[in-house]
Image (cartoon, helix red, strand yellow):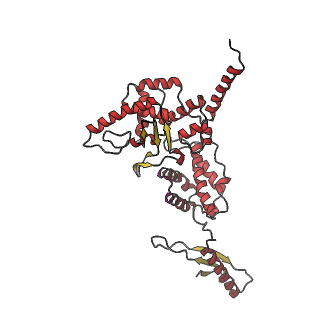
């Protein structure tokens, strides 16, 4: 039954009633904060009439609470954000995504975390965007956060408030009425053919393991974690193809751990050239020799690329090696993702369609591929136009 408590002014006259409805206890037995409302008394009512009207309101309020029609929108953004994070973890959101969310919340909650959901306004969030664009907000550089990073904060706030709107705690998503900064599109970084030739020549001087890793990055366009997540049973040397269905990641909380690829469409079979199959066969011979030589300490993980004891490699080791490799040979800066962009650009310039390229890259939507490589598509189309002109419009000399 609802609890009703009278509130009086300094003259001792009842001006309102505080109505509370017990919410229950949590999983640890701790009593949850009750549902509350305030019922104001009409100054012209008698004390008896005021009490009766409050009791009627209490019965109605208790019924609304029990049927889920009362929105607990007086909890703060920080508290509700914590609830949403727990909800996402229970529903299977990837650890890497949750880790990123929690990192963003470290900047968000000092600004708007104390504000109740029912009181949160677009102005509060716009002020946060202004704060994020100030100097010293970037921990690594000591400078400002990029617009892209600020928009990441905006999207997380929007995600949290979208859940609140879905649960009918707020009438609309306040973040949808804010003004986040515009993000300038950055063209993908890819290597020119002459750069690729230099890289290939320099790879002839390198260890078979790193040579194989680099060629797979270049010819398949796989992500770094997908490459290191490869296991031997996913390598089909007979049919010249590899299956991507695993992702090797690292976080301070979990250490090295395996996860599914980025999206469901990232699980894919990729055809590889015969030259890469030949290279993989050579690498496998070396791998088996190493396993035999280090049998006493070898960890049978079945990963394709491993450390000296057979244990999986840290994803950062690929990035570090490529950077040192580029410095040793006076090559342009190399990172794993640049090879992904390079493969896509080569396919576009050779008139391969976006659907095929998107499937090879493992994008969730073809539109994602088209958006990322819009500039390259435009260049490729210009080249195609010239070829049509050569054949149909220009007379041979």
Residue visible at 52% across and 72% down? 32
- Return the residue found at the far bottom: 48
Q: What is the quadrant of residue 276 in the picture?
A: top left
The residue under the point 65% across, 31% down is 378
Residue 166, can we see it? yes
Q: Position of residue 173 (x, y in %)?
A: 65, 57
**In front here: 254 or 36?**
254
**Residue 98 rendering spot, x and y as whole percentages:** 50, 53
Let me know if residue 203 is in the magenta part: no
Question: Among all residues in the image, which is located at the extreme top?
Answer: 397
- Is 40 situated above or below 106? below
* Front residue (pair 223, 318): 223
Above/below status of 23 relative to 73: below
Q: Name the spot of residue 267 as percent of width and height, x first.
A: 50, 45
Please identify the residue farthest to the front as the structure is shown: 238
Q: Quick one: 386 or 185, which is closer to the camera?
A: 386
Question: Is residue 89 highlighted in magenta?
Answer: yes
Residue 11: tell me if it is visible.
no
Name the foreground residue: 280 vs 223.
280
Q: Which image quarter holds the N terminus? A: bottom right
Residue 231 rendering spot, x and y as whole percentages = 40, 42
Q: Quadrant of the C terminus?
A: top right
- With 393 as the anchor, is 22 left or right in this view? left
Q: Residue at x 60, y 68 (%)?
A: 72
- Residue 179's place in the image compared with 308, above or below, is below
Q: Which residues lie in the magenta part?
A: 88-95
């Amino acid at each position: 039954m609802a609890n009703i408590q009278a509130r009086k002014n300094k003259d001792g006259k009842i001006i309102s009633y505080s109505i509370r409805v017990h919410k229950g206890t949590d999983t640890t037995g701790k009593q949850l904060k009750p549902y509350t409302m305030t019922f104001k008394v009409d100054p012209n009512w008698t004390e008896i009439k005021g009490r009766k009207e409050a009791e009627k309101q209490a019965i109605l309020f208790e019924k609304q609470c029990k049927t889920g029609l009362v929105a607990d929108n007086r909890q703060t953004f920080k508290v509700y954000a914590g609830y949403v994070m727990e909800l996402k973890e229970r529903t299977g959101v990837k650890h890497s995504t949750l880790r990123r969310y929690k990192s963003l919340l470290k900047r968000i909650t000092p600004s708007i975390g104390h504000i109740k959901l029912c009181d949160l306004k677009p102005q509060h969030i716009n002020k946060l965007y202004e704060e994020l664009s100030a100097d010293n907000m970037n921990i690594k550089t000591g400078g400002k956060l990029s617009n892209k990073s600020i928009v990441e904060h905006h999207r997380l706030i929007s995600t949290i408030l979208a859940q609140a709107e879905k649960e009918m705690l707020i009438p609309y998503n306040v973040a949808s009425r804010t003004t986040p900064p515009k993000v300038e599109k950055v063209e993908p970084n890819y290597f020119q053919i002459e750069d690729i030739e230099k890289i290939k020549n320099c790879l002839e001087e390198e260890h078979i393991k790193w040579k194989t890793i680099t060629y797979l990055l270049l010819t398949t366009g796989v992500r770094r974690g997908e490459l290191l997540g490869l296991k031997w049973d996913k390598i089909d040397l007979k049919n010249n193809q590899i299956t991507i269905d695993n992702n090797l990641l690292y976080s301070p909380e979990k250490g090295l751990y395996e996860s599914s690829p980025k999206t469901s469409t990232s699980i894919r079979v990729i055809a590889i050239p015969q030259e890469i199959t030949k290279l993989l066969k050579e690498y496998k011979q070396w791998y088996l020799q190493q396993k035999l030589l280090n049998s006493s300490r070898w960890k049978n993980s079945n990963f394709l690329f491993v450390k000296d004891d057979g244990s999986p490699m840290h994803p950062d080791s690929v990035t570090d090696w490529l950077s040192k490799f580029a410095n040793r040979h006076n090559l342009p800066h190399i990172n794993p993702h640049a090879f992904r962009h390079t493969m896509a650009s080569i396919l576009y310039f050779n008139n391969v369609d976006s659907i095929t390229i998107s499937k090879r890259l493992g994008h969730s939507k073809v539109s994602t591929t088209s958006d990322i490589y819009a500039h390259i598509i435009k260049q490729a189309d210009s080249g195609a136009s010239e070829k049509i002109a050569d054949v149909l419009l220009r007379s041979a000399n």
